Amino acid sequence: MEAVLIFLAISALFSNAVAYDPLDPNGNITIKWDVISWTPDGYVALVTMNNFQMYRHIMSPGWTLGWSWAKKEVIWSIVGAQATEQGDCSKFKGGIPHCCKKTPQVVDLLPGVPYNQQIANCCKGGVVAAYGQDPSAAVSSFQVSVGLAGTTNKTVKLPKNFTLLGPGLGYTCGPAKIVPSTVFLTPDRRRKTQALMTWNVTCTYSQILASKYPSCCVSLSTFYNSTIVPCPSCSCGCQHKNCIQKDAKVLTTTGVNTPRKDGSPLLQCTSHMCPIRVHWHIKLNYKDYWRAKIAITNFNYRMNYTQWTLVAQHPNLNNITEVFSFSYKPILPYGSINDTAMFYGLKYYNDLLMEAGPEGNVQSEILLQKDQNTFTFKQGWAFPRKVYFNGDECKMPRPDDYPHLPNSAPKFAERPLQQLLFILASLFWALQMV
Ligand SMILES: *[C@@H]1O[C@H](CO)[C@@H](O)[C@H](O)[C@H]1NC(C)=O
Ligand SMILES: *[C@@H]1O[C@H](CO)[C@@H](O)[C@H](O)[C@H]1NC(C)=O
Ligand SMILES: *[C@@H]1O[C@H](CO)[C@@H](O)[C@H](O)[C@H]1NC(C)=O
Ligand SMILES: *[C@@H]1O[C@H](CO)[C@@H](O)[C@H](O)[C@H]1NC(C)=O
Ligand SMILES: *[C@@H]1O[C@H](CO)[C@@H](O)[C@H](O)[C@H]1NC(C)=O
Ligand SMILES: *[C@@H]1O[C@H](CO)[C@@H](O)[C@H](O)[C@H]1NC(C)=O
Ligand SMILES: *[C@@H]1O[C@H](CO)[C@@H](O)[C@H](O)[C@H]1NC(C)=O
Ligand SMILES: *[C@@H]1O[C@H](CO)[C@@H](O)[C@H](O)[C@H]1NC(C)=O
């Protein structure tokens, strides 16, 4: 009983902490400002955005970073990015600043700008890879020259109210904090230099903030039961959603699939109304192995998903033997529990999930070695516990609806034991994190 109470208390705690992702508990985006020189009226800072999230990337059309100046600062110039609006610079004569707004918003430049407007890690159209997929591309930088600001580490005022925006992005940023100055190595690696001052801002993701409804759903099938369990109806919300039939004439009009600035989708009509469906099929049963097929289908005519990621949690994923046409990486959110895997496309083969239509799907099969002590087809054990697409958790069917083994009615007597095991497992996880 005590255990149950503790578990309830802990789960209440976590459900309130909106920005907590149990499969990536340390994931965040950190924005670091390194002051690299003082100027007569301010400073030049190198701003670096590091995506430390294992499987959540920032897709095209990319990030928009905003903040509020603490005093009357202006941006004289930016290299590797630009402010979206100049604002009112009318009080300046001669040199006109790049941006005079109290709350500037900065976006990355597009690839292919002239070299003299670039710096390292800039100019990727605001696209930032997930750390687990490509750590070297999980970073974005620009350099900003700030005027009417403090000119010593005692007089500089840190910018406030950071925001990280973009279609479908649900980040909340904390306050800027002064941290130990970054040490840089010179290009020949023979000398170390140091930022004059460094501050960090940490932003965390919350799916609820990004959207009220899930953005993907899961359907299930097996070789032992011909029932296909579809995504729950209205998984992604049906109200105020428009959709078109898959053979609608309007689809042949040019420009109908041009992405919108606000990211609004053009959905194919389905009962679930999700832009993405993940199908998990239990395909084959061998003596020591079993095989599952995973298919991802895009129902949005206005979206090509680049660098997509799929995360699945299942107790047998610690014994993946082969993944046939996706890349694969185990994720160990709590160090020792190896039950979560990230899948993503093979470069130039299926790393692009095309817009809805005949090409709008990617698929793979995985081969897993059975752990003879736990393996079973009973009670949907072979289905994933959780599925995430691009970092958002997908809506699963209700366990009661899972395909059954022939002649095996659900055994209600076994449920309390399962529940107890679930509580114990959750408690174990929770304690590991404290
Ligand atoms: C942000 O993520 C990094 C890498 O996982 C971690 O070391 C750091 O503690 C995190 N910061 C916060 C404030 O959670
Ligand atoms: C500040 O951010 C950088 C990454 O941009 C990170 O490596 C460093 O650990 C952070 N410092 C603190 C004190 O959080
Ligand atoms: C400011 O600079 C002085 C020396 O120039 C240094 O001793 C001090 O630690 C610095 N403070 C911060 C917050 O960086
Ligand atoms: C930051 O945001 C808070 C709440 O939205 C607001 O009260 C405050 O004035 C803002 N600060 C600045 C410097 O804009
Ligand atoms: C997706 O990519 C294909 C091929 O690059 C292109 O023809 C199509 O217009 C793109 N669709 C969208 C919605 O961007
Ligand atoms: C986790 O499982 C994968 C798949 O079998 C395996 O390759 C990897 O070595 C395991 N990692 C740990 C730390 O157990
Ligand atoms: C499954 O993986 C675990 C840990 O990764 C390992 O100890 C165990 O021997 C594996 N089981 C089989 C049947 O290979
Ligand atoms: C297949 O599973 C469904 C539950 O989803 C169940 O109603 C049905 O009886 C099963 N079919 C067989 C042949 O056992």
Image: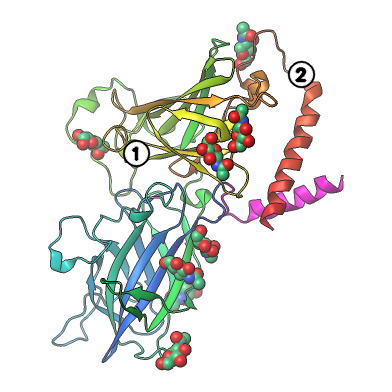
Residue 206 falls left or right of residue 32: right
Rendered residue at 47%/49% (across/down): 54
The spot of residue 221 in percent (x, y) is: 53, 18
Task: Indicate which label's residue lies in the foreground, 1 or 2.
Answer: 2
Residue 252 falls left or right of residue 35: left
Most common secondary structure along the magenta stretch: helix
**Mark 1 lies on residue:** 265
Closer to the camera, 434 or 411?
434
When the figure is inspected, residue 45 is found, relative to residue 267, above or below; the finding is below
The spot of residue 96 in percent (x, y) is: 17, 81
Residue 8: within the magenta? yes
Alpha carbon separation for disc pair 1 and 2: 42 Å
Closer to the camera, 65 or 94?
65
Residue 77 falls left or right of residue 291: left
Q: Which residues are magenta?
A: 1-22
Please identify the quadrant where the C terminus is shown: bottom right
Circles 1 and 2, Cβ within 8 Å, touching? The answer is no
Rendered residue at 34%/90% (across/down): 151
When the figure is inspected, residue 12 is found, relative to residue 364, above or below; the finding is below
The spot of residue 308 in percent (x, y) is: 37, 40
**Mark 2 lies on residue:** 411
| Amino acid type for the residue under numbered disc 2 | Lys
Kindly state the secondary structure of the residue where label 2 is placed. Answer: loop
When the figure is inspected, residue 410 is found, relative to residue 42, above or below; the finding is above
| Amino acid type for the residue under numbered disc 1 | Pro
Chain-order first, disc 1 or disc 2: 1
